[in-house]
Image (cartoon, helix red, strand yellow):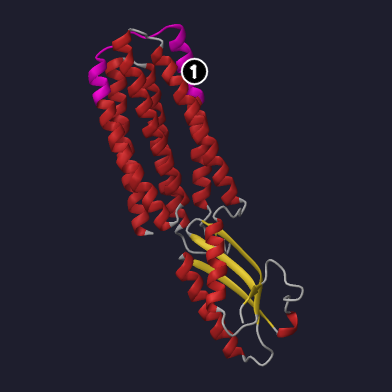
Amino acid sequence: MKKTLRVAWASLLISLVVLGMKTAAYWLTGSVALYSDAIETVINVVTAATALLALWYSARPADTNHPYGHYKAEYLSAVVEGMLVLATSVMICSAAWDGWHQPPVLHAPLLGIGVNAAAGMLNLLWALVLLREGRISKSPALVAGGRHVMTDVWTTGAVLTGFGLVPLTGWTWLDPLVAIFIALNILRSGYGLLRQSVGGLMDEVTNLGEADAVRRAIVHGGQGAIEAHDVRMRVAGRMTFVDFHLVVPGGFTVDAAHMVCDRIEQSIREAVGEAVISIHVEPAHKTKLLPLRQDVLVLS
C-alpha cells in the first residue's frame, strides 16, 4: 500500500506539470483545441488528488463502523472521476461551439505544438506506469487514473493532428472541430469509468478469470473434503472476499477439517493475492452432489 500511495503522489505531481505545459501551449496559441486539452488535464489533477485521498482512506484498518474495511473508497474515487470527465466534455463542447461561430486567431502554432507534444509524451509514459501498478496492486483508483490519462494521450494526439493542419491549410474551423471530437471521446471514456465503478460498488463480478481461479484454488487445496458449494466472491479495491460451504466426511475431526480449510485459504491467496475467506464446514449428509449442480465443486 505504501508503494501505491507513492505512485498516487507522483501522479498528482506529474498531472500538475502536464497542466502547466498544456496551459502554456494554449496561452501561446489561443487555440480552442489546445484549450480543451488543457481543461481535460485540470480534471486529471483533480482526479489524481481524489485517488490519493481514496487510497489513503482505503488503507485504514477495519473498525466498528466498517467491519469489512474501507476498500470500496477507491470505487467512490473512480465514480467521482467519471462524473468529472462527463462535466469536462460539456465544458469543451461549449468552448468549441463558441469557436465554431467565431474562430480564434492562432499565434505561434509550431511552438504550441512542440510544448503540447512534450506534455503528451510525459502523459503516455505515466499512463503506462499507472496501468501497470494499478493491475499489480489491484487498485481501481490507479487503474481508473491510468485509463483517464491514456484518454488524455489520445486527446493530445488528435489535437496535434488537427491543430497542425490549421497553419498548413488555413482552415480555422478545424480547431473547434477537433475540440468537438475530443469532447465526444471524453464522454465515451467517462461512461466507461462510471459503468465499471458502479459495477464494483454493486459487487458485480467483472473478472470471470479471477472467479475461475478461485474455484480452481478450492479444488487444488480441498483434497480430503467431499465438495464445496455456494461459492461466492466479490472484489473491493485490492481485497477479494470469498465465502462457501465445505462438506467433509462424517469421521473428520475438527483439527482435520481445519487443516483442509488452511490449505484452501493458502491456495486462494496464492491465486488472487489479498483475500478475506469465510468457510462454513458441513457434515457429509449436506452434500449436493446428487443431482450434481453447476455451482458444486467435487473435491474427492
Whether 89 is among the magenta residues is no
Q: Residue at x 45, y 44 (%)?
A: 144
How many marks the image carries: the answer is: 1
Tell me if mark 1 has few (under 14), some (14-19) or many (20+) residues whose alpha carbon lies within 10 angstroms of its own: some
Position in image of residue 68 (x %, y %):
56, 63
Can the viewer see residue 211?
A: yes
Position in image of residue 76 (x %, y %):
53, 47
- The amino acid type of the residue labelled 1 equals Ser
Can the viewer see residue 63?
A: no
Image quadrant occupied by the C terminus:
bottom right
* Closest to the observer, 253 or 236: 253
* Closest to the observer, 194 or 161: 161
Q: Is residue 130 left or right of residue 244?
A: left
Give the answer, above or below, for where 227 lies relative to 120. below
Image quadrant occupied by the N terminus:
bottom left
Residue under numbered circle 1 = 94
Position in image of residue 71 (x %, y %):
51, 57
Q: Is residue 143 left or right of residue 228?
A: left
* Closest to the observer, 117 or 62: 117
Q: Residue at x 44, y 59 (%)?
A: 59
Q: Residue at x 39, y 17 (%)?
A: 32
Give the answer, above or below, for where 118 lies relative to 35. below
Q: Quadrant of residue 260?
A: bottom right
Position in image of residue 244 (x %, y %):
64, 71
Give the answer, above or below, for where 153 lies relative to 61. above
Read off the magenta span.
Answer: 90-114
- Magenta stretch, main secondary structure, is helix
Identify the element where label 1 is drawn. Answer: helix
